[in-house]
Image (cartoon, rainbow, N blue to C red):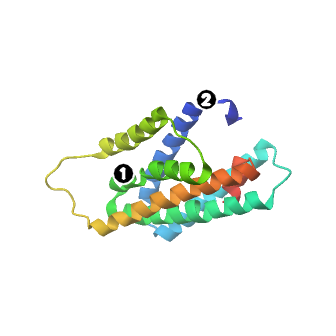
Amino acid sequence: MLDSLHPNLLGFIAAFFIASARTCYRGGLSSLTPAATTLVSLSVNAVFAWVYYVLEGGWDDWPLRGVLWFMAAGAVGTLGARYVSFVSILKVGLARGAIVIQTSLIWSAAMAVIFLGETISFGVGLGTLAIMFGSILLVYRQERAQKHIPLRNYLYPALTAICLALSHLFLKSGFFWLPSAPVGMGVG
């Protein structure tokens, strides 16, 4: 169904949904704890994943290696990164946290080159940096009376970025054994 769309359009759609979700998370965190917000968001994610799985027609063979890689991706990325990112929103704010979380692009690319043997062209590397710095420029404000946030609080979004990068590595390994996005999302 979505396989026929251009990858750039898919990336744009994904970015839109991620930005919308992060904005909604901020609203949810005003009345729920990070743990409760994580539970609600993971529940919604699981329902959509399994509905899409059924609509896609299912997948007959579930190799254990693929399932285990997806479970690892879910533990590190879907659960770990999401929870820590919610704490990060409370500690440093949505916009500031998003800047640091964007470094996951660099971490993911580096891990793909180191552990998966992938290569990155100059254009792709430059584009990745442009996306990361573009997001920084979107939220940069030069004000004298900025909210003082202890530097140690920026460890939360940094940890989120590392977890997301590891999750991408695990997902890629899972897709090698079990090439189904809905199964990966549902198991994760």
The residue pinned by badge 1 equals 99
In which quadrant of the rendered image does the N terminus lie?
A: top right
- Residue under label 2, please give it: 6
Which sits in the foreground, 173 or 67? 173
Determine contact: label 2, label 1, CB under 8 Å.
Answer: no
Is residue 149 in sight in this rendering?
yes
Amino acid under disc 2: His
Q: Image check: 50 left or right of 9?
A: right
Image spot of residue 187 (x, y percent)? 70, 59
SS of the residue under disc 1: helix
What amino acid is found at the position of numbered circle 1 in the picture? Ile
Quick check: 80 left or right of 43?
A: left
Label 1 Cα neighbours within 10 Å, binned few <14 / some 14-19 / many ≥20: many
Q: Quadrant of residue 169?
A: bottom right
Q: Is residue 140 left or right of residue 156?
A: left
Locate residue 127, reporting x and y percent: 44, 35
CA–CA distance in space, label 2 to label 1:
27 Å
Q: Residue at x 64, y 50 (%)?
A: 172
Q: Position of residue 16 (x, y in %)?
A: 49, 40
